[in-house]
Image: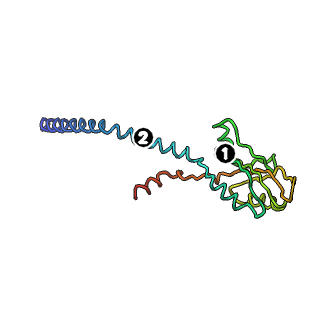
Amino acid sequence: MQHLRSVQADKLLTVERGETSRLTAETQELAPVSTYIAAIAGQKVVVQKTMATEALLSEVLDDLALATPGGVRIETLSATVGAQDQQTQQKQTGTTITCPAPNPFVRTKSVGCVTLTGTATSRATVGLLVTRLGATGVFVSPYVTTTSTADGAKLTFTGSVAVTAHVYSNRYADIDALLAERSRR
């Protein structure tokens, strides 16, 4: 009886060794697929991190247009949008984007700065622009640095406004959902 069990165990062991060899060969054959999948996962992370600070300048311009009252004309505009916060930007570039503000002692969370010059019909319309810029959600700490009335009835002004993280698209924040949606098409 013992001998019979030993023979059966040896046969089973031989079968399992053959199966192990077959599975090992298949695993080695599929190793490049595993490497490819790991590389794709790494690319997903790179895309998410890189695109996390993709700024939509169109949103800046749209909100600026909505905030600009009649009687104000923006002549020049310069926009700088950087890292999600000043600490992150400091780590990445060694500098931060500073934007003049009405109160230089209060730091506002911003990711960029828009400087602009323009003309207006009066100081009141410039004040209305400043008030509207502060209410959009995309801008914070609007500040007019100079106003002057050189020639004619037009008033010229120079100012700046800090840009908040609302300008980031975050379109690849949930890349898995985007890929799943694309595969359903």
Q: Nearer the viewer, residue 153 or 170?
A: 153
Q: In the displayed orientation, state which residue is furthest to the bottom.
A: 70
x then y, percent, for residue 1: 12, 38
What kind of element bears circle 1?
loop
Q: Nearer the viewer, residue 75 or 116?
A: 75
Tell me the amino acid under the disc marked 2: Ala
Nearer-N-terminus badge (1/2): 2
Q: CA distance from mark 1 to mark 2?
A: 30 Å
Q: Is residue 33 left or right of residue 91?
A: left
Q: Which residue is mark 1?
A: 85
Numbered tag placed on residue 38 in the rendering: 2
x then y, percent, for residue 162: 72, 50
Q: Is residue 145 left or right of residue 14?
A: right
In the image, what residue occupies the spot 55% across and 44% down? 50
x then y, percent, for residue 136: 70, 59
What kind of element bears circle 2?
helix
Label 1 Cα crowd, 10 Å radius (few <14 / some 14-19 / many 20+): some
Quarter holding the C terminus? bottom left
In the image, what residue occupies the spot 40% across and 58% down? 184
